Image (spheres, helix red, strand yellow):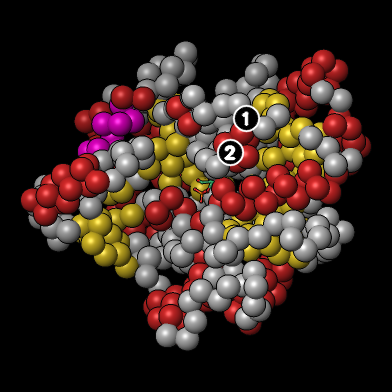
Amino acid sequence: MQPLIQTPPPGPKARAILERDARVISQCMVREYPLVLEKAQGVNLWDVDGNRYLDFSAGIAVMNVGWNHPAVVQAITGQASRLTHGAFLDFCSEVPVLLAEKIVDFMPEGMNRVYLSNSGAESVEAALKLARHHTRRKYFIAFYGAFHGRTYGAMSLTSSNVIQRQYFGPFLPVIHVPYPNPYRPLGLEHDTCDLDTMAVLEEEVFRTEVAPDEVAAIFVEPVQGEGGYIVPPPAFLRRLRDLCDEHGILLVADEVQSGCFRTGTFLACEQFGVTPDIVCLSKAVGGGLPLGMTIASDAIMNWPRGSHASTFGGNNLACAAALAALNIMSEPGFGPQVQQTGAHLLAGLRDLKNKYQLIGDVRGLGLMCGMELVRDRATKMPAREERRQILAQAFQRGLTMLPAGLSTIRFCPPLTIGKDDIDTGLAILDGVLSKEGR
Ligand SMILES: Cc1ncc(COP(=O)(O)O)c(C=O)c1O
């Protein structure tokens, strides 16, 4: 369906709300363009002035089963009339238990215990605490470009944009190392740039900064999200897994963005043949409601009663929405379908790269694709201002996309999107690039 822009955004109603927003809401968020939402359905968004947009953002990779999926809406309304807050930390109820049983079915063998919280950052906080509690070690390792959330522990791991850390320290003891980025390798080799990362870890960090037996966990995004939608070389996670096994370090896969079939398999790390010790999930797993999950084996998640909890963790309403969303994701062929549509999207992005010099790189797994813009292909200087223009102009033409990293556009539409809608979005982008893209 073609987007329909009747009133160039922001229209009069949007402007009025934005003015009120500027007066009462803490202005600490970054918004790329002035979209004021009224409703959403499937892969379409409507603003308060009646404009319809085709959505390539899924509300930051949240609405994987499509906006307002009828089954999710029905689950929420049904549950709302029975029990919303179930005080799960004091009283038991069945819906969170059903959800935990369901998620365990999606997990690798042996990951059978679930801690329920309310957000991605909380799922990461739980993983940090669990890793320390289990190993009795203090230090953590994470990656440059990583995004794990904005609470103190999660922020300590985060290293994707200095504004997210400036004046907030001191942080937890986290050592950051380069994430292997085949487009911008540390050394000369693109395909094996993960070896550079491993060398930094083993030959520099472990030799000069911290002994490996003091490291509780390595936190990794199997595909780096906010940092620029970067797909590491295939052997990277396996190498990390081996390093962790050698030193008794826990491997934590933050699948908050890459999970729930975003990359074509339920967890992205499945595609790298690696089983982590702890998995963090949020975003899409809640079907649009706030929900976080930290999952590990019995042997790791054996902290005692009272050691961790949250008032809203296991909220019945969020769990009911999550169950409905996971039921949709369980339908036969859901993952392969994502792989097919993702391949179609990536092929379209490659065509654009052949046409426009501004596009330095396109990459992706499933429907987690990135397009990195550069001023010049030889120097790879990030084209930040050009990206801002392109996102703003695509929005004016009815296509919503989000940035990631310094100059990447991320493509993370609802996973239910069809090839026709992908083509419509790519045609809009082509039109914008023909003006901006050189
Ligand atoms: C990989 C990853 N981890 C954690 C988070 C934090 O999630 P939240 O914003 O729900 O706290 C995000 C958010 O974008 C994320 O992408």
Residue 357 visible in the shown view: no
Q: Quadrant of residue 187?
A: top right
- Asked whether disc 2 touches disc 1, contact meaning CB atoms under 8 Å apart, the reply is yes
Q: Position of residue 405 (x, y in %)?
A: 47, 32
Residue 152: image tag: 2
Q: Quadrant location of the N terminus?
A: bottom left
Task: Identify the residue at horizontal 84%, vertical 49% (top origin).
Answer: 134
- Ligand 1 within 8 Å of the CB at mark 2: no
| Element assignment for label 1 | loop
Q: Residues within 10 Å of mark 1 (few under 14, many from 20)?
A: few
Q: Pick whichever, 318 or 42, lies toward us.
A: 318
In the visual, does 376 lie left or right of 105? left
CA–CA distance between discs 2 and 1?
Answer: 7 Å
Left or right placement of residue 407 versus residue 117 in this view: left
Residues shaded magenta? 386-394
Q: Where's residue 194, x and y in %? A: 72, 29
Tell me the quarter of the image containing the C terminus: top left
User: As shown in the figure, which amino acid type bears the numbered disc 2?
Assistant: Tyr
Which numbered tag is attached to residue 171? 1
Which quadrant of the figure has residue 329?
bottom right
Q: Residue 265 got which mark?
A: none
